[in-house]
Image (cartoon, rainbow, N blue to C red):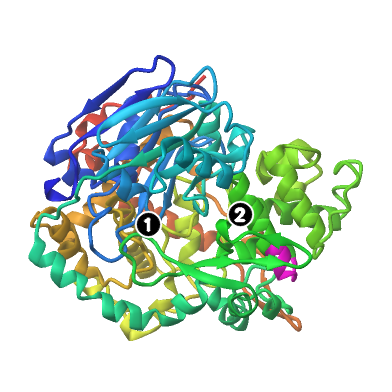
């Protein structure tokens, strides 16, 4: 496999059982790198306009990046995508682990799955061979049971498994695609797409070698491992949850459905406490020296099996402080349920917090909730609802639709308490702490997402603004509160680079500096690339996904912000931090559209933008924007 990629993309039609292999040009790989870029290109070319996300014709894409599987630190990422059942638009989620590396070793850069099987099926890909196998005995079983059963049937403990889980079988709109049991392609409901196709799992095994294009550069970049380990020692020790006490201190820890930024019992659920009480092992992904993954075990009030890993920051906050739950063991157990069922912990936690607030305000009653007294702080109710959501039982059946659809079904002004954008619940980072997040959340093609956004608190220092000088952007330090034009200029560049990393398959937790990205891609592929070229990759991927959304009926009116974030953020003791002013956000969005080259009327990229991005074929689709009925 020269140049960091296999040069082969597999298509599987579950309806007919037929398979085919495409061999894209080197230009295709250089333009898109993989991941998000390949998904956006595929959906525009193959997804019928206006299709129901749960219909057989919605393509489900697993796509590695050109760096995935290389020896470079942080190269264990790949992406999953389809039209989202949660947002009705572009769906994409990234995930680490080893599955993507194994797919490349088996001879493919991506797998595109169309159609739907007539009965539960799993896909078996091994060293260039493809089989469809009966999964009837796997339907309705936990992710750990399914992985063990597939490995046993195939007689190989090294098989890597991606699966939809019970939540996906039940078409929960924020079901995950689980990999290696405890790693989730967590957002936009792609597990439901998988479940709708009766595709229980995709098992992969490969014995091929993944060669790099420039071995000298790869060796030089690999020497960076020592500094990564040293710099991220705390991350290794306590995982992403290790920073919760700092989040509490500065007032940015989502609490009580994002009403507040401080949780007075945070020490009970902090990542540092998790390490002391329940951590039994640390885990890592392919070629990662950090090892931030948690593996926990509990045997008291709740029993947690270490096979399901352990909660990271997003989960500790979504199922903890956001619901005012201070019972760490219950959060660990709820995390286990989400991993066993294949459920996004962020959307689950925020949807439950929405219900708790509505119940607290008298907008929901026990008549609505099948007798459940849904109160903030009740860990037993939180755990019960996680199970009900995944199984679509009781009140959980409504919550399985996501907080926006649930609020619209209930009415009674409950929608104002649904903390979501485009139907996707917000992650555990409050834009009232750092205003640039508001721009990224509002305009994200996938709905609110923190992993292709810009966390601008660093701009308050000289060092923080200086790192953008390599992009030709020069600025004085900027306060995290406020949306001056220069902050939007910087956000535009930062978001393009974040999306580029998703395309390439590079973990964002590795402390790479911007000037290193050309060397990273060159090491994997042998290409002589510049930072401007790579930034263009991100801009292109964003443009194609925005075009897809416009074709599916999303407009600039969907680029909005939850009502909650226009309100002051409670910090305790009567102290507050200001909300994001609507007029400031509107001005920033106007400038952001201009900088990205998007039309302010349709929300899609302009024709000139698409031609400048070398995807002129996509400009021919612009005249199709309008009602899908």
Other-residue count near label 1 (Cα within 10 Å), few / some / many at <14 / 14–19 / ≥20: some
Q: Quadrant of residue 431?
A: bottom right
User: Which mark is on residue 591?
Assistant: 1
Other-residue count near label 2 (Cα within 10 Å), few / some / many at <14 / 14–19 / ≥20: many
Q: Residue at x 54, y 77 (%)?
A: 242
Name the spot of residue 440 as percent of width and height, x first.
Answer: 45, 57
Decide whether residue 59 is among the magenta residues.
no
> Counting residues from the N terminus, which is met first, the one under dot 1 or under dot 2?
2
Residue 623 appears in the picture as rendered: no
Name the spot of residue 367 as percent of width and height, x first.
Answer: 91, 41
In the rendered structure, the answer to whether residue 373 lies left or right of residue 600 reads: right
Highlighted magenta segment, given as a residue range: 324-331
The Cα–Cα distance between marks 1 and 2, rounded to whole angstroms, is 33 Å
Question: Circle 1 — which element?
Answer: helix
Name the spot of residue 122 as percent of width and height, x first.
Answer: 46, 30
Q: Residue at x 74, y 38 (%)?
A: 398
In the rendered structure, the answer to whether residue 479 lies left or right of residue 263 reads: left
């Amino acid at each position: 496999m020269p140049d960091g990629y296999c040069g082969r993309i597999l298509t599987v039609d579950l309806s007919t059982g037929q398979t085919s292999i495409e061999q894209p040009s080197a230009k295709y790989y250089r333009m898109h790198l993989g991941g998000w870029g390949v998904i956006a290109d595929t959906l525009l070319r193959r997804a019928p306009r206006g299709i129901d996300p749960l219909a057989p014709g919605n393509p489900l894409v697993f796509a590695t990046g050109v760096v995935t599987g290389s020896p470079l630190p942080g190269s264990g990422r790949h992406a999953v995508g389809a039209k989202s059942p949660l947002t009705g638009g572009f769906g994409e989620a990234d995930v680490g682990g080893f599955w993507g590396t194994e797919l490349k070793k088996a001879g493919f850069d991506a797998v595109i799955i169309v159609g739907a099987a007539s009965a539960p099926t799993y896909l078996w890909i091994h060293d260039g061979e493809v089989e469809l196998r009966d999964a009837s005995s796997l339907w309705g079983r936990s992710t750990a049971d399914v992985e063990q059963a597939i490995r046993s049937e195939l007689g190989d403990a090294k098989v890597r498994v991606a699966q939809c889980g019970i939540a996906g079988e039940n078409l929960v709109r924020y079901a995950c695609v689980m990999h290696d049991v405890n790693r989730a392609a967590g957002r936009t409901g792609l597990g439901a797409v998988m479940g709708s196709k009766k595709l229980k799992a995709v098992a992969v095994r490969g014995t091929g070698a993944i060669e790099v294009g420039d071995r000298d550069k790869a060796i030089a970049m690999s020497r960076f491992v020592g500094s990564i380990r040293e710099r991220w020692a705390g991350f290794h020790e306590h995982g992403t949850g290790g920073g919760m006490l700092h989040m509490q201190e500065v007032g940015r820890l989502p609490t009580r459905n994002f009403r507040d930024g401080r949780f007075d019992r945070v020490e009970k659920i902090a990542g540092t406490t998790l390490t002391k009480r329940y951590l039994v092992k640390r885990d890592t992904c392919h070629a990662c020296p950090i090892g931030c993954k948690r593996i926990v075990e509990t045997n008291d009030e709740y029993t947690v099996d270490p096979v399901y890993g352990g909660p990271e920051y997003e989960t500790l906050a979504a199922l903890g402080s956001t619901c005012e739950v201070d019972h760490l063991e219950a959060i660990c157990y709820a995390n286990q349920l989400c991993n066993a069922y294949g459920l996004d912990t962020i959307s689950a936690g925020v949807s439950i917090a929405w219900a708790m607030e509505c119940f607290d305000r008298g907008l929901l009653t026990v008549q609505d909730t099948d007798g459940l007294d849904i109160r903030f702080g009740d860990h037993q109710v939180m755990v019960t609802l996680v199970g009900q959501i995944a199984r679509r039982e009781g009140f959980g059946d409504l919550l399985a639709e996501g907080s926006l659809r649930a609020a619209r079904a209930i009415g009674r002004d409950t929608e104002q308490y649904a903390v979501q954008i485009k139907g996707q619940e917000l992650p555990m980072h409050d834009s009232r702490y750092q205003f640039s997040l508001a721009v990224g959340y509002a305009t994200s093609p996938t709905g609110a997402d923190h992993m292709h956004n810009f966390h601008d608190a660093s701009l308050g220092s000289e060092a923080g603004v200086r790192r953008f000088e390599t992009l030709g952007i020069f600025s004085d330090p900027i306060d995290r509160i406020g949306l001056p034009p220069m902050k939007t200029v910087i956000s535009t560049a930062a978001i393009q680079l974040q999306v580029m990393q998703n395309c390439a398959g590079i973990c964002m937790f590795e402390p790479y500096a911007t000037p290193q990205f050309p060397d990273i891609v060159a090491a994997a592929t042998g290409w002589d690339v510049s930072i401007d070229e790579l930034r263009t990759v991100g801009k292109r991927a964003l443009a194609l996904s925005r075009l897809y959304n416009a074709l599916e009926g999303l407009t600039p009116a969907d680029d909005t912000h939850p009502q909650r974030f226009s309100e002051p953020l409670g910090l305790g003791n009567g102290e507050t931090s200001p909300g994001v002013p609507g007029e400031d956000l509107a001005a920033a969005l106007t400038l952001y559209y201009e900088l990205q080259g998007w039309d302010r009327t349709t929300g899609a990229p302009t024709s000139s933008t698409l031609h400048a991005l070398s995807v002129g074929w996509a400009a021919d689709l612009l005249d199709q924007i309008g009602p899908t009925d």
